Structures are given as C-alpha cells and as structure tokens.
Image (cartoon, helix red, strand yellow):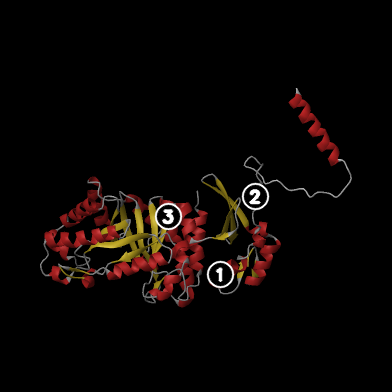
C-alpha cells in the first residue's frame, strides 16, 4: 500500500511540473525499433514511350537502314520527324502481346518491333536475342577474334545467345602429339569478354579438313585420337553444343578421306566416343546443302541421323545455309517440310547470302526476301532451334557473303525484316 501511494505521488508531481510555464524542452525523436511500421515505397509508374531517352536512337537506326526516310502510317518522314510524331502520340505506335501469361508492350514501326516494355519496367531495345527467346530460337553469330575492338563490344551478349567457334584441324593438329588449341581458346576468350556464354564447336571431325599426317594413312585409332582430344578440349571449355562430324560421306559431292577408308561406321563411332566422353553435350551432325528437298546431302543427313537416333546418340541436325544463292533457295513451305522430315530438331548452323548474280538495284529487296523465308521457315516449322548468322556484319567475310549489317555494323533493312518475321509469328 505504501509503495502504491509513493508511485501515485511521484506521478502527480511530474504531471504538475510539466504544466508550469517555462522554457520548452526539445523533444528527442525515438529511434525506430524492429517493430516499427516499414516505409512503403510506391511502385514507379511504367515509363511512357515518349519519355524513353533512347527513342531517337532506335528511330535513327531504323530510318538509316531504309536510306534516311521511311513511310509510316501513310506519311514519309525522316528520323527527327518520326521521333516527334511518336512523342506526340506514342499509343499509335504501341502494341500489346501476352507471352507465356505476361503482358508486354512493343514499340512497332511497320511491323518491326524496336523496343519492349513489361508492366513495371522501362523501355529497352529489342534485339534478335530477345525475339528469338520468345520464339524458342537461339540466335548465334560468328565473331572475328582478329578484330580487337570486339573485346570491348559488350552488345554481343545482348544481341546473340551464343557464337560458334571453329577448329582449323589441318593447321592446328600437325602430328599425333601436337594439338594446338590456342586459336580456339582465343575465340572463346573474345566471346566471353564480349558478353557471350554459349558456344557451338565445329567440329570433332571434318571430312573436308583432315590433318595432313592422317590423310596419308587413315586408320580408326588415329581418327579416335583426333576426336577424343577435340571433344575433351571442348568439354574443358564448357562448350555445350558440339558438331561431332561435319560434311561426311557423299563422295560424289566432295572429298572425305575418313569415309573413303572407314565408311559410314566412322560417323557412328565418332558419336559413340563423343557421348562416352561428354554425355551432357548436345551432339550434332552437320552438313551443307541439306536444306534442299531430295538433294544428296539432304537424303544422307536423314539416313545418318536416323541411324544415330536409334542409338540415342544425336540431339540435333545442323543445316548449313552458308553463302546461299537466292535462286537456289527453296520456298518457305519446302524448307519447313525438309526440317520436319529430320528425326531430331534442326539448327541452322551458318546463314548468309550470295548476291553476286543479283542486280545492284534489286539486292536489298532480294536479301529481305531471303531473310524472311529462312527466319519464317525456322519459326513456323516448330522444330528449328537455332539460326546462326555466318558473320555479324559484311566486314567479316568476303563481299559476296552478305549478312544483316553493313560493314560499319549499322543495321540493314534485312535486320528489321528478321525482327518483324519473328514478331509476326509469336504464339
């Protein structure tokens, strides 16, 4: 009872003292404890296309590809005029697609997507890689390791899923005891420095590129030695996709010392050994002109891939469209039919175009048509899993081997045709 009375008295004294006029005592703000209500930061509103800082660059890239002026919604405009028109009415240039249950907004000019935005993000530039990922198609490209500028070109990792790396076997395997992989290793280094992490190795064995010492006396033991060293080195580099054998057989079409001496079994043996060494790898048989209906290499590719599939040794067929001439290109439907007739998924392992016999004033349109046909066949077939561009731009190859970019790396009309084709066929 005394204790209770004492506390009551103290409380009254403190209360009355607080009511006496005098100098105000500063209030010390208490430090929030763990039980304090957290501050909630409002989710920022999605960026308006008109406010995207890179909008002028995206428009300039597109307009430059078409020669400095384009017609959009019935009006011919240069880059500056088009940028202003977009800023005044961005909704007119925006389309919505739901992909895998997620809503995306696309900035689209004449059917080609130039930028993309999800519900809570800023606008970012559309790339071949982005559109390929939506379509289930990996976009690869060769790079030029001799161009040291590429060692700082970080855009490669945004533009492409991966790159193919090549082993020059006749030049780098000079004896049974001398396997020089410095060139292959350097290609990997440049690619990784440029933001690329996926690779396709060509090749474990190449019928057209046989080490000189082995050509003189082809035997299974030495063939196994070459293949084993190549596959083991590719595995040590973390290369996921391996063309085990490229352009085998078809002796009326080309030379193949391996096939001449060992026959078809050398291909089977190569895949068995590659699978034994690197069971996690995606093993590929690659060939040329095997996109042409009924052609000798097409029929051979079907035959050998079926034999390999029966043994569960193959994951993909490589279809090479290297230096393709427009006059020789099958129709889109014919390509789709060829792709579907292979027993395993298809990878277009090298694509560029030879326009030598096309009149100068028709080359842009012809290239556009070829690109639309190849990209369209790949995505519509639903069995094509890769398009690999042979050369990132025209400076990396002979003039006849035309790509999607000019020699100065500026994008061509064909680049935007590729984007448009992938976009139009999104499911």
Characterize the local packing of mark 1: few (<14), some (14-19) or many (20 or more) Cα atoms within 10 angstroms: some
Which of these two is toward me, 31 or 287? 31
Residue at which label 2 appears: 43
Between residues 361 and 84, which one lies in front from this camera angle? Answer: 84
Residue 272, x across and y down, in percent: 20, 51
Q: Is residue 79 above or below residue 263?
A: below
The picture places residue 118, in percent across and down from the top left corner, at 58, 52
Residue shown at the point (68%, 67%) measured from the top left? 84
Image coordinates of residue 205 in percent, x first then y, are 22, 62
**SS at mark 2?**
loop
User: Quadrant of the image for the N terminus?
Assistant: top right
- Residue 267 quadrant: bottom left
First along the sequence among labels 3 and 1: 1
Alpha carbon separation for disc pair 3 and 1: 24 Å
Instruction: Kindly give the residue lying farthest to the front in the view shown.
Output: 2
Check disc 3 and report the residue beneath it: 137
| Residue 325 x %, y % | 37, 69
Query: Is residue 310 shown to the viewer in this render?
Result: yes
Q: Image check: 133 left or right of 110?
A: left
Answer with mark 1 or mark 2, whichever residue precedes in sequence: 2
Residue 247 visible in the snapshot: no
Identify the residue under disc 1: 61
Of 42 and 167, nearer the camera is 42
């Amino acid at each position: 009872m005394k204790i209770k009375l004492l506390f009551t008295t103290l409380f009254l004294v403190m209360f009355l003292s607080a009511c006496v006029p005098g100098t105000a005592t500063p209030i010390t703000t208490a430090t929030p404890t763990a039980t304090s209500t957290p501050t909630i930061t409002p989710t920022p509103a999605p960026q308006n296309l008109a406010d995207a800082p890179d909008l002028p660059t995206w428009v300039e890239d597109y307009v430059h590809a078409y020669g400095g002026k384009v017609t959009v919604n019935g009006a011919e405009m240069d880059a500056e005029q088009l940028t202003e028109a977009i800023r005044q009415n961005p909704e007119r240039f925006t389309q919505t697609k739901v992909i895998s249950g997620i809503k995306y907004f696309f900035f689209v000019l004449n059917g080609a997507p130039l930028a993309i935005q999800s519900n809570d993000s800023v606008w970012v530039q559309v790339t071949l890689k982005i559109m390929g990922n939506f379509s289930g198609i990996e976009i690869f490209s060769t790079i030029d390791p001799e161009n040291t500028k590429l060692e700082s070109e970080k855009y490669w990792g945004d533009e492409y899923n991966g790159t193919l790396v090549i082993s020059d076997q006749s030049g780098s395997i000079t004896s049974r005891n001398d396997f020089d992989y410095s060139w292959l290793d350097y290609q990997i280094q440049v690619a990784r420095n440029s933001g690329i992490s996926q690779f396709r190795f060509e090749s474990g064995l190449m019928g057209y590129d046989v080490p000189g010492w082995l050509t003189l006396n082809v035997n299974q033991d030495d063939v196994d030695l070459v293949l084993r060293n190549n596959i083991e080195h590719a595995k040590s580099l973390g290369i996921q996709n391996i063309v085990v054998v490229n352009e085998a057989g078809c002796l009326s079409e080309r030379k193949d010392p391996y096939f001449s001496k060992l026959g078809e079994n050398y291909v089977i043996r190569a895949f068995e050994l590659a699978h034994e060494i690197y069971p996690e790898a995606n093993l590929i048989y690659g060939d040329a002109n095997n996109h042409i209906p009924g052609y000798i290499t097409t029929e051979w590719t079907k035959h050998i891939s079926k034999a390999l599939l029966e043994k569960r040794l193959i994951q993909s067929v490589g279809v090479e469209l290297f230096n393709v001439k427009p006059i020789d290109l099958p129709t889109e439907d014919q390509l789709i039919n060829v792709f579907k007739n292979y027993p395993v998924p298809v990878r277009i392992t090298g694509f560029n175009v030879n326009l030598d016999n096309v009149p100068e004033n028709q080359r842009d349109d012809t290239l556009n048509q070829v690109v639309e046909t190849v990209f369209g066949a790949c995505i519509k077939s639903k069995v094509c899993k890769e398009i690999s561009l042979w050369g990132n731009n025209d400076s990396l190859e002979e003039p006849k081997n035309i790509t999607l970019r000019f020699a100065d790396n500026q994008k061509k009309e064909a680049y935007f045709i590729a984007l448009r084709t992938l976009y139009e066929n999104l499911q």
